[in-house]
């Protein structure tokens, strides 16, 4: 089996691995790098549990080849917190009860993170569209929306204090 | 689910991709956004021995204005179409429709060219390109040629593209001031294909229809242009009766396949409803 050598940065760390071309990004992260945050849900690009950030864009890791990330900057849920300090989106899901079983949460967090980078002051309606590629079978979404609103306010406050 | 094995190629120019296509022949498949091809490979509906990834060919990406026309690179992602100021100003139908495709993550990967070249009548850009009278630029080993959208779609998954050719860009005319437009799409949920959808581009003059294009998604073997409906409207005031007449003429050409989205009668009725809505919305924008 021919393998291709790929190099990328994952959560800021340089990674170099030889992979089969058919290896999906989500399998690469989970099996080669032991980053099991991104979950394998539907495997058909519907549920969004495998959502990660590639070059500052949200993508579904189940429908993206690892070889396509050669030279890319990848960020997973493991890269969100700063040591023991949770990122505002994590804090939002925690304090607003934005999860029950937690299976969809890594994808939700990564999508919320990128969505708020692109749109720091969203309306509730914009959040519903922005998060529409992520499915949750437990919560009914109300608390997820609240969590994103909470994180948006937190991030704006942090930016205001820093300025 | 893991795709079958294949050799991966990542050319950085269209010329290089065409050379690869010519030498690998039917063993090779082009990879655009991958949101149709990779799922098909997981299910073994497609098992190409070679994948030629077009994502590193910068010249195939982006939206530009060229001699009064708007040229969209085939590898332009749906999210870039949604966010393109040029398209919002000159061809607002495309951002409006692209917003209704997939979900945010899918729109980051899915491309206009992949959507068209796949030849799936459930995709949205085929009907949109019929309504916009788009022209496609195609490059192959024998050189460059253009083909009108109307001549491009031969059947389900069958297009005018030869095995050694690549769709390079999509060319549409900028809307004249006062052009009305709409893409009305009925879908069960975010990310689903249309149960039925209708694209309309409309110009009114003195209260009468000066010109109209109507095209339908996912109600036939290809996207369908509703010619009889267009002809029935042209030169007439856009009254409720005229809209009803156009909707029934559009329904008459529908030949949908029954699936979980509904039976043939339901899908045909919904196509008619999408035409009514799209005409009404387009008319409201003609000013």
Image: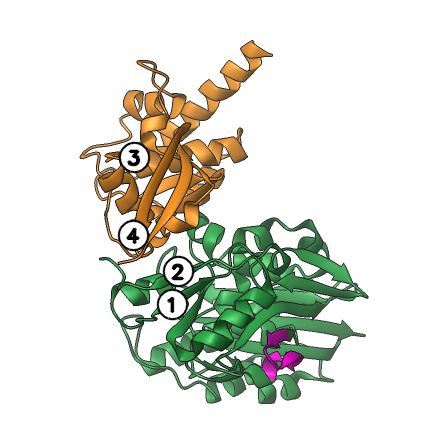
> Is label 1 in contact with label 2 (beta carbons under 8 Å)?
yes
Residue corresponding to mark 2: B8
Of badges 1 and 3, the one in the foreground is: 1
Horizontal and vertical percent position of residue B255:
40, 86
Question: Which residues make up the magenta segment?
Answer: B137-150
Q: Residue at x 34, y 20 (%)?
A: A91
Mark with earlier residue (3, 4): 4
Q: CA distance from mark 1 to mark 3?
A: 33 Å
Tell me the distance, in whole angstroms, between the alpha carbons under discs 2 and 3: 30 Å
Q: Which residue is disc 3 drawn over?
A: A106
Residue B119 picture location, percent across and down = 46, 76
Mark toward the viewer: 3 or 4: 4
Q: Which quarter of the rendered picture does the C terminus of chain B lie within?
A: bottom right
Q: Nearer the viewer, mark 2 or mark 3?
A: 2
- CA–CA distance in space, label 1 to label 2: 6 Å
The lab-note entry on whether marks 1 and 3 share a chain reads no
Question: Which residue corresponds to mark 1?
Answer: B50
Give a yes or no on whether discs 2 and 4 share a subunit.
no
The chain carrying label 3 is: A
Colour given to chain B in the rendered image: green
Q: Classify mark 2: helix, strand or loop.
A: strand
Disc 4: which chain?
Answer: A
Q: CA distance from mark 2 to mark 4?
A: 11 Å
Residue A104 left/right relative to A101: right
Query: What chain is the orange one?
Result: A
């Amino acid at each position: 089996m021919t393998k291709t050598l790929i190099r990328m940065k994952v959560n800021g760390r340089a990674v170099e691995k030889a992979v089969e071309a058919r290896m999906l990004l989500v399998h690469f992260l989970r099996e080669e790098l032991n980053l099991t945050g991104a979950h394998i849900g539907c495997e058909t690009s519907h549920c969004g549990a495998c959502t990660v950030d590639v070059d500052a864009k949200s993508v579904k890791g189940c429908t993206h080849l690892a070889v396509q990330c050669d030279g890319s900057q990848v960020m997973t849920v493991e890269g969100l917190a700063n040591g023991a300090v949770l990122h505002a989106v994590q804090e939002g899901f925690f304090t607003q009860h934005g999860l029950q079983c937690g299976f969809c949460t890594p994808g939700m967090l990564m999508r919320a993170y990128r969505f708020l980078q692109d749109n720091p002051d969203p309306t509730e309606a914009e959040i519903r569209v922005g998060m529409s590629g992520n499915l949750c079978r437990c919560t009914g979404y109300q608390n997820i929306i609240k969590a994103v609103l909470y994180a948006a306010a937190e991030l704006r406050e942090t930016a205001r204090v820093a300025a | 689910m893991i795709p079958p094995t294949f050799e991966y190629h990542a050319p950085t120019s269209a010329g290089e991709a065409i050379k690869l296509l010519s030498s690998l022949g039917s063993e090779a498949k082009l990879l655009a956004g991958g949101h149709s091809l990779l799922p098909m490979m997981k299910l073994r509906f497609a098992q190409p021995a070679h994948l030629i990834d077009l994502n590193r060919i910068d010249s195939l990406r982006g939206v530009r204005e060229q001699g009064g026309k708007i040229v969209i690179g085939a590898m332009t992602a749906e999210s870039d179409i949604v966010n393109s100021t040029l398209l919002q100003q000159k061809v607002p139908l495309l951002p409006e429709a692209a917003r209704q495709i997939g979900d945010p993550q899918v729109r980051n990967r899915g491309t206009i060219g992949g959507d068209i070249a796949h030849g799936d009548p459930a995709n949205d850009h085929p009907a949109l390109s019929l309504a916009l009278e788009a022209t496609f630029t195609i490059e192959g080993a024998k050189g460059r040629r253009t083909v009108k959208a109307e001549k491009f779609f031969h059947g389900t998954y069958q297009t005018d593209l030869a095995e050694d050719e690549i769709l390079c860009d999509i060319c549409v005319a900028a809307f004249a001031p006062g052009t009305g437009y709409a893409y009305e799409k009925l879908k069960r949920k975010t990310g689903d294909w249309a149960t039925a959808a209708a694209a309309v581009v409309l110009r009114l003059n003195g209260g009468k229809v000066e010109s109209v294009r109507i095209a339908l998604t996912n109600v036939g073997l290809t996207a369908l242009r509703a010619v009889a409906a267009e002809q029935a409207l042209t030169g007439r005031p856009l009254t409720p009766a005229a809209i009803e007449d156009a909707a029934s003429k559009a329904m008459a050409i529908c030949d949908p396949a029954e699936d979980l989205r509904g039976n043939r009668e339901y899908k045909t009725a919904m196509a008619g409803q999408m035409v009514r809505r799209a005409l009404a919305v387009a008319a409201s924008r003609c000013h």
